[in-house]
Image (cartoon, rainbow, N blue to C red):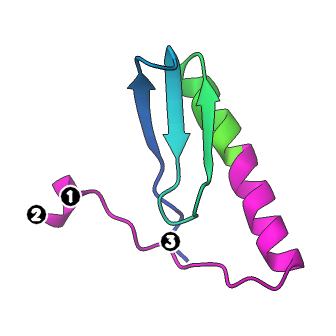
Amino acid sequence: MKDYHINIFYSEEDEGYIADIPDLAHCSAFGKSPEEALAEVLKAKTAWLQSARSNHVTVPEAHYRPVIYQAA
């Protein structure tokens, strides 16, 4: 299985970094640095997957691919 793509971007409004996993609905995290946001979203991913499996929710396959890579 491919792993999920993670987006990390700076939010002026939140004055920090946001990391999200587009294939996992509402799976995102905040950090004061990109590294902190990444570490937090990896924790959120683990929790998201555990919760989905415990509640018999279908875990989506990794499909998201940024547009920049779709052109190649």
Quadrant the C terminus occupies:
bottom left
| Residue at image mark 3 | 2
Quadrant the N terminus occupies:
bottom right
- Where is residue 26 shown, x and y percent of the image? 60, 55
Could you say which quadrant of the image residue 66 lies in? bottom left
Determine the residue located farthest toward the front in the rendered image.
13
Q: Nearer the viewer, residue 12 or 52?
A: 12
Cβ–Cβ under 8 Å for marks 3 and 2 = no
Q: Secondary structure at mark 3?
A: loop
Q: CA distance from mark 1 to mark 3?
A: 18 Å
Q: Secondary structure at mark 1?
A: helix
| Residue at image mark 1 | 67
Q: Amino acid at mark 3?
A: Lys
Read off the magenta span: 43-72
Relative to 26, say whether 54 is above or below: below
Residue 71, label in figure: 2
Q: CA distance from mark 2 to mark 1?
A: 7 Å
Cβ–Cβ under 8 Å for marks 2 and 1 = yes
Q: How many marks?
A: 3
Residue 20, label in figure: none
Left or right of residue 59: residue 10: left
Q: Is residue 69 magenta?
A: yes
Relative to 45, say whether 35 is above or below: above
Label located before the other in sequence (3 or 2): 3
Relative to 67, say whether 31 is above or below: above
Q: Residue at x 83, y 67 (%)?
A: 51
